[in-house]
Amino acid sequence: MPEVRTVATHCPYCALQCGTRLTRERRGVSVRPTDFPVNRGGLCQKGWTAPALLDVADRLRHPLLRRDGELVPVSWETALDTIAARLHAIRAESGPDAVGVFGGGGLTNEKAYLLGKFARLALGTSQIDYNGRFCMSSAAAAGTAAFGLDRGLPFPVTDLGGADVVLLAGANPAETMPPLMQHLRSPDLIVIDPRRTATAEQAALHLQPLPGTDLALALGLVHIAVTDGFSDTAFIRERTQDFDAAWQRAMSWWPERVERVTGVPVSEQRRAVRMLAEAGSAYVLTGRGAEQHSKGADTVAGFINLALALGLPGRAGAGYGCLTGQGNGQGGREHGQKADQLPGYRMITDQAAREHVAEVWGVLPEVLPGPGRSAYELLDALGTSDGPRALLVFGSNPAVSAPRAEHVVSRLTSLDLLVVADFVPSETVELADVVLPVTQWAEEEGTMTNLEGRVLRRRRLQVPPGHARSDLEVLHGLATRLGEPGHRYPTTAREVFDELRRASAGGKADYSGISYQRLDAGEALHWPCPDGEHPGTPRLFLDGFAHADGRARFAAVEHRDAGDVPAEEFPLTATTGRVLAQYQSGAQTRRVAELNDAAPEVFVEVHPDTAARAGLAEGALARVSSSRGSTIAAVRLVPTMRTDTVFLPFHFPGDGRANLLTGDALDPRSRMPEFKVSAVRIEPHREVAP
């Protein structure tokens, strides 16, 4: 082993994918930020402590097989042979859709691609989806409908620094992606959030609507833009269509009505529109707070309508974008692990798309199964008469992150076979029949695609510990045992990426001109990049939108109630979200001492008056209950909270799972669950005597 080894790579956490330099010495691995455009030499707490993930005490090092109720170490041959034999039997008895696959938005492009190919060819199943359905699917649906193309930011992050005004609807980057805030120091910020977050504290204007009413607010802002003379009529006429239908819906949302529904004062509504309209450069950005609703796609469309009405998209120095959350949230949804998509962001129901991908894969188009269930619907169907009897999970922890979490756990435990590939023993791993230890970020090669659509190189610093293998090796081993030819499932990331390039060629997310050679040479390549001479496309839509006629579409959307409305038994609204020191389900960050010390347990933010009515004091344990279940959390009194709203972070396991409260209402277009609105009551927690 050499004394010192250094590689340039990227942070394993959020979709900024901050540039870092890792150094391995005898004493361990250290990290330093690089002057990469999105982070400019900065890192957040999670980035600085990321090397601690590489040697956590309970790192998975050996395959595990459940015997007599206990997970015990076995060889790789035993683990893979056992899985393959049980999959053979299940498929023979119940057909290929009796096996499901659940992926993750943190997988590299290569893993996501090969996972989708494995599901559709080796398993022959349509039952594949991923946890990105819980994060960006509403913005994807709305963006595709409006612009003909879904890319989180159709411009580089650095463009935001030149703006005069930025509106953030349901986003809290000061905690979720802190390095982004250096690009938001110059603009005046308008923040729409039910909470007075760390980002809202830095805003010139904070609009604080009741959770679940963001669409009413968006409609009201469009109303003001038109009636107060701020709309860009020339842009609307020349570069869009369907404005009249959208205006018919927004027309009835006059400011006073919006105030009654949302609680946002008329004066603040008018000020927000005026700030955006009078700015020389302005952006509208949405995040999970706007998306995670049973009307999330329509809510995002409402904010896109506002941006279009003001003439922001499709010109330099202005626009609309979505702040993607997971590390590969963008690339993860482009290459085939989503139920309705094939590589290159092709729709699986498109015959031409099926023919193209089938040719690359060397099969007939009719071999490819059709679209399957979305993420929650897949989890909900597990173990039922017409649902999967087996599930393979890669890069996700649905026992904590899925809505209606206790129900999802019951479905996972009803399976004939649950296989989980991970590098730490997550709560989902603890339920598994077979556990496969896999590599993590600094132990593998690959690519990630950040929120700007920029493809980045992940580089290997060190070999994994114990007997951990890459996900690519796992998929190869399973595929060959299921009768597939080995060459169809390469085990090196470069080979997989070269095939991905061919499969994506001509698609909306065209990577065919991107290569490891170009990336390693330091080229900044944003998709689409259709050939080896193409410079990539950092800024989309400047010459036209991606619809055939080059025009963007307004959406005729209407506000409607959330799936769960407060009533006498459950009079408050609970909303969920993230905190600075934890990430996603917390399976990684809860194992890093510095991060866990900063946020060690679940809490519930409550207005002091609301707490007093419930008989609760600061630090007391509260029981927060919905019609689905109860969560136990420590009370934090927050005077800036709305008196009708409580907040819980979703990173914690056991009785602290915020998703014990959330329900199964889904957006009809994106199939996004409604994480942001649950009708609840809050009361002191009383221990029940045994």
Image: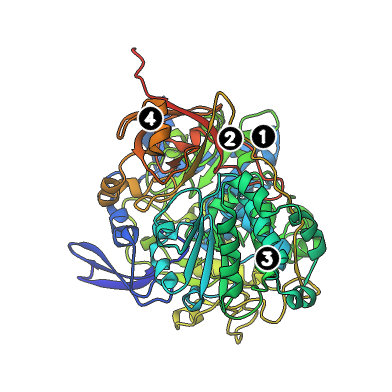
Quadrant of res 227:
bottom right
Q: Earlier in the sequence, mark 2 or mark 3?
A: 3
Residue shown at the point (59%, 68%) measured from the top left: 274
Q: Earlier in the sequence, mark 3 or mark 4?
A: 3
Q: Are marks 3 and 4 in contact (CB under 8 Å)?
A: no
Q: Which residue is mark 1?
A: 387
Quadrant of res 615:
top left
**In the figure, is residue 20 to the left or right of 490?**
left
What distance separates the C-alpha of mark 2 from that of mark 3? 35 Å
Q: Secondary structure at mark 2?
A: loop
What distance separates the C-alpha of mark 4 from that of mark 2? 27 Å
Label 3 Cα neighbours within 10 Å, binned few <14 / some 14-19 / many ≥20 = many
Mark sitting on residue 225: 3
Mark sitting on residue 663: 2
Closer to the camera, 408 or 165?
Answer: 165
Q: Amino acid at mark 4?
A: Ala
Q: Secondary structure at mark 4?
A: helix
453 shown above or below 298: below
Q: Position of residue 35 (x, y in %)?
A: 36, 77
**Label 4 vs label 2, nearer the camera:** 4
Closer to the camera, 357 or 47?
Answer: 47
Query: In the rendered view of the protein, which quadrant contains the C terminus?
Result: top left
Residue shown at the point (76%, 73%) measured from the top left: 236
Q: Earlier in the sequence, mark 4 or mark 2?
A: 4
Residue shown at the point (61%, 85%) measured from the top left: 534
Q: Which residue is mark 4?
A: 612
Q: Position of residue 218 (x, y in %)?
A: 64, 56
Q: Amino acid at mark 1?
A: Gly
What distance separates the C-alpha of mark 1 from that of mark 3? 48 Å
Residue extending furthest toward the top: 690
